[in-house]
């Protein structure tokens, strides 16, 4: 019983701290695909490196919290996704082999970020 409470407490603390230290917590979706998110704010994507499981489809929610319209662009994900200030979009991403894949805001190409499949 004590071990169960301790494990629950540690999991809760970990999930609360993940965004603060730049790690995206994985949350299972209804169809058992893991879900991740990236946020564009003040010209930067956070986290700068998103780690996802290799060979597994996942959902990626892109949140625009910058003051401008963004164009989320990744060659591996496919189409460019335009988002106005305050908008979110969830993208179904096909399974990726192990590797690191770049993405960017096509309107702000100086600031690149990465998805790493492990």
Image: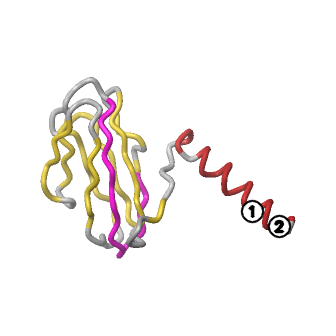
Q: CA distance from mark 1 to mark 2?
A: 6 Å
- With 8 as the anchor, is 52 left or right in this view? left
| Residue projecting furthest to the bottom | 55
Q: Does the segment drawn in magenta span residue 61?
A: yes
Disc 2 packing (10 Å; few <14; some 14–19; many ≥20): few
Q: Which residues are magenta?
A: 50-65
Q: Nearer the viewer, residue 73 or 10?
A: 10
Q: Where does the image place residue 11, in percent across and percent down from the top left?
A: 67, 57
From this view, report whether residue 18 is shown above or below residue 42.
below
Indicate which disc residue 68 carries. Answer: none
Give the position of the C terminus as an image quadrant: bottom left
| Residue projecting furthest to the left | 79
Disc 1 packing (10 Å; few <14; some 14–19; many ≥20): few
Which residue has dot 1 on it? 7
Q: Are marks 1 and 2 in contact (CB under 8 Å)?
A: yes
Q: Does the segment drawn in magenta span residue 53?
A: yes
Please tell me in which quadrant of the rendered image residue 111 appears: top left
Please tell me in which quadrant of the rendered image residue 9 appears: bottom right
Q: Where does the image place residue 116, in percent across and percent down from the top left?
A: 38, 60
Q: Where does the image place residue 112, in percent across and percent down from the top left?
A: 28, 42
From this view, report whether residue 114 is shown above or below residue 71.
below
Tell me the SS state at disc 2.
helix
Residue at image position (21%, 61%) is 76
From this view, report whether residue 16 is shown above or below residue 35.
above
Indicate which disc residue 3 carries. Answer: 2
Residue at image position (85%, 69%) is 1
- With 87 as the anchor, is 32 left or right in this view? right
């Amino acid at each position: 019983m004590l071990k169960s409470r301790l494990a629950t407490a540690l999991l809760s603390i970990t999930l609360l701290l993940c965004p603060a230290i730049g790690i995206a917590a994985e949350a299972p979706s209804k169809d058992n695909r893991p879900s991740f998110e990236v946020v564009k704010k003040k010209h930067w994507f956070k986290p700068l490196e998103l780690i996802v499981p290799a060979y597994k489809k996942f959902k990626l929610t892109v949140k625009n919290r910058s003051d401008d319209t963004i164009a989320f662009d990744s060659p591996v994900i496919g189409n460019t996704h335009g988002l106005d200030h305050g908008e979110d979009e969830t993208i179904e991403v096909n399974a990726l082999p192990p590797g690191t894949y770049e993405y960017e805001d096509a309107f702000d190409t100086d600031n690149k970020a990465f998805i790493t499949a492990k």
